[in-house]
Amino acid sequence: MLSKEDVIRQAQSLGFEDIGFTSAEPFDSHREVLAARQQEYGWVEEKGIALLQGTDPRNALPQAQSIIVLMSVYLRNAYPKYLEGHFGRCYLDDDRITKNGLAVKVKALRAFLQDNGIASKVPFNLPHRMAAARAGLGTFGKNGLFYSRKAARQSSWVLPITVVVDQPFEPDAPTIRMGCPDWCRNACIAACPTRALKGNAAVDPRRCISYLTYYGEGLTPRELREPMGLYVYGCDRCQNVCPRNAAWLAEQLPPNPAVDAMQADFQLEQLLGMDKAYFKNRIWPRMFYMPPEQMWRWQMNAARAMGNTRDEKYIQPLAQACQGNGDERVRAMAAWALGRIRTIKARTVLETLKASAPGLVAAEIAVAALDMPEGP
Ligand code: SF4
Ligand code: SF4
């Protein structure tokens, strides 16, 4: 029979930074929170992610006795500024499709458990942050994120992985509490541009830029376009401003050649002008929350981000998208973005497009025209 020390030794040898144990008892308090906040979280269930079911580990493994929580640091490398400016860091080295990084380590640990007669499951819908806190691996922040007790300088750049097993292990002492210093004046809440943070770790996911970039319905409402800024997929603002994360952000991390190589494919111009083949081959395997039929949302996000750069170099691709993109929501956002660049050149382009613009696009051009500089 394996001891906790055996499991810890093996997990450490595979590169997991911290390991904790908790029982397989249901996460009743978490289920109550989810049930009480159906308005904010009901959409997750609609997307097919059974969060309520995930609160009982025995739904994944009926004979479950314990949960092993493995702490993995997802920010191990220095990423190019361009990518960090437009994409949440946790998506830049995400192997959930390619399965060539973290998945290999999890698989190796499960094989080790199996070789020692232990059955395991890694349910995607188990409340992994709460499990990590129950296993004593760290505390929460008011931004709703989990802060490790030791990995990545005790920051939130971590991903807890929950392995449900059928062998009992002595649970570690829980650390279910807020770990923010008194002197921090809620920097995360103040910094959230879309007011998704409600205080005390309560998040309205429907107002979070991460949600809005990959699940938002239809044309992004006008009042959110400027606050969403340059982000195309995900958002790290509440983590970037957090003093608990400062030490790890100041680390000299080594580059990651595979992520560096993504830059060329993930340029805003490429995203706005891509076709389905490009999307399926180069984008989707790295960031997969939107299926090919929702490629328009990627393009809409790229157009909005271009507008928020206020960089004239994007006028030409935006004008092209405004006329030629097959989706009206993308064309409309391209018109908005041209208005946001707000130079004489952008105004001239919008005036040319106005004559032939239908519906949503015409409405965006009309609004943009109200805020345009006077030209010669
Ligand atoms: S990820 Fe961005 S939008 Fe979401 S809560 Fe944090 S700062 Fe707000
Ligand atoms: S910014 Fe301040 S309040 Fe927010 S999570 Fe960090 S320490 Fe806590």
Image (spheres, grey):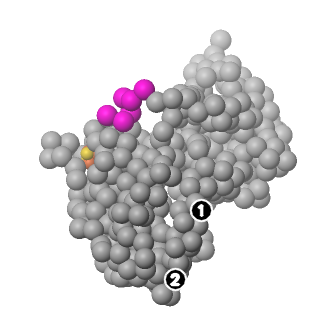
Residue interval drawn in magenta: 247-252
Q: Residue at x 59, y 44 (%)?
A: 93
Q: For the residues carrying marks 1 and 2, which lies nearer the camera in this image?
A: 1
Residue 186 in percent (x, y) is at 24, 46
Residue at the disc numbered 2: 61
Farthest-out residue, left: 182
Say which element carries label 2.
Answer: loop
**In this rendering, would 295 be left or right of 102?**
right
Residue sticking out furthest to the bottom: 62
Residue 133 at x, y percent in the picture = 31, 64
Q: Residue at x 51, y 29 (%)?
A: 254
Identity of the amino acid at label 2? Answer: Leu
Q: Which of the two residues, 206 or 323, is positioned nearer the viewer here?
A: 206
Q: Which residue is mark 1?
A: 107
Q: Is residue 51 above or below residue 137?
A: below
Residue 112 as seen in the image, left or right of residue 41: right
**Around disc 1, counting alpha carbons within 10 Å, would you say few (fewer than 14), some (14 to 19), or many (20 or more)?**
few
